Amino acid sequence: MNGNDKSNLVSLSFFTLWKVVLVVAVVYFVYYLRDIFLVLLTSIVLGSAIRPFSTWFEKFKIPRILAVLLVYIIGFSVILGTLYFIIPPIFGDMLDIAQTLPAKMNSFMKSSGAWSSVSGFSTSFVDDFSINDLMNSNVSSFLPAIPKNVMELITFLFNGVFSFVLIIIISFYIAVQKNGVEEFLRLIVPLRSEAYALDLWQRVEKKIGGWLQGQILLGVIIGPLVFLGLSLLGVKYALILAILAAVFELIPFFGPVLSAVPAVIFAFSIGAPVGLMTLGFYVVVQQFENHLIYPLVVRKIIGVPPLIVIISLVVGAKLAGFLGIILAVPMATLFMEMANDMETRKGLFRLQSTRTENHEN
């Protein structure tokens, strides 16, 4: 090996080492400021999701900033109006739940000798056991920790409100700026990759908007359907459970299952027949959603396999909690688009290689 080869090897090794150090530094920087990046990513997703609605208003010659403002006003009006009409009955139902739940649990534990057949439990133990006594004993141990818990709650609420306000402001700015994200990509992406990055973002943005519209449509369909079914079955707190089902539709796959758990519990507190019918009702709704609504509304829009969605939800929840769940599907959409592009380039490369070999032969 001559001197030039050694010099090139040393330069290449140093350049590779420098790139590794730079990547590690960037990863550490992103992790250290992960809360800020989560807020920024959530703002981008929200701003991109409301663009189709603002674009629809622009068709009526409404200026863009007014169109975006209208979307926010309508959205907040719907949310606040819904809360105004449902908070009183929900509050009353919650008080009723708090008052009746201990008695129902005691009644369930003592009924039909359910616990007597379980090894290690006797009827006398069940008779002596009381949910009210358990709650009262826990209150005395909880009281000394109230000041600390209150401060933690205040800090949590402050951080949550601050992040929420920041997300609204940034997403509003992104939605108002016609090419805000595109200009940001031009700023940070190398020139040789700029065209691809812009094309990738346009495709992902379109799918994100369609995905959110699809999830909202699922909630609009499932919420009233659950309310009607639970009301016909005579399950109490049907309004709360229906709202829970509609909201949890924003969480693919896991949301409907989680919303069914409290409904089935309350139904079984009425009686086994009602509980079984409620369980069957949720199974039917779930099948109806998975095999008819979801494929037509959501899967066709984002083109992400269900397994990838489930994995992204688990990873997102583990890494970033609630915001991670919100960002899971959009990020999965981005990675799927990139994977499809890589597969397309591989196919073109194979085709070109085959043509070259045939030409040489």
Image (cartoon, rainbow, N blue to C red):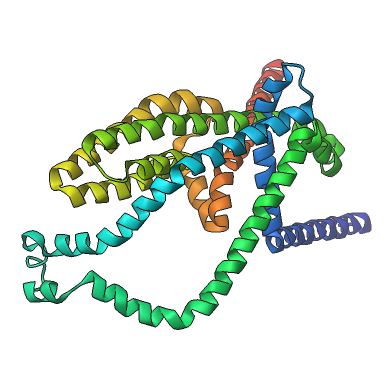
| Residue 131 image offset from top left, x and y in percent | 24, 70
Relative image position of residue 39 (x, y in whole percent): 68, 51
Residue toward you, 251 or 189: 251
Q: Residue 345: tell me if it is visible.
A: no
Residue that protrudes farthest toward the right in the picture: 4
Q: Residue at x 38, y 31 (%)?
A: 224
Indicate whether 221 appears above or below 4.
above
Counting labels gives: 0
Describe residue 95's horizontal placement relative to residue 271 as left or right: right
Specify the quadrant that holds the C terminus: top right
Q: Quadrant of residue 347?
A: top right
Residue 107, image x, y percentages: 15, 61
**Quadrant location of the N terminus?**
bottom right
Q: Residue at x 31, y 32 (%)?
A: 228
Q: Residue at x 57, y 40 (%)?
A: 332
Q: Nearer the viewer, residue 221 or 304?
A: 221
Q: Judge left or right: residue 90 versus residue 361.
A: left
Image spot of residue 226 (x, y percent): 34, 35
Q: Is residue 17 above or below residue 165?
A: below
Whether residue 290 sits left or right of residue 340 in the image: it is left
Q: Residue at x 67, y 17 (%)?
A: 358
Q: Is residue 132 visible?
A: yes
Left or right of 308 in this view: 59: right
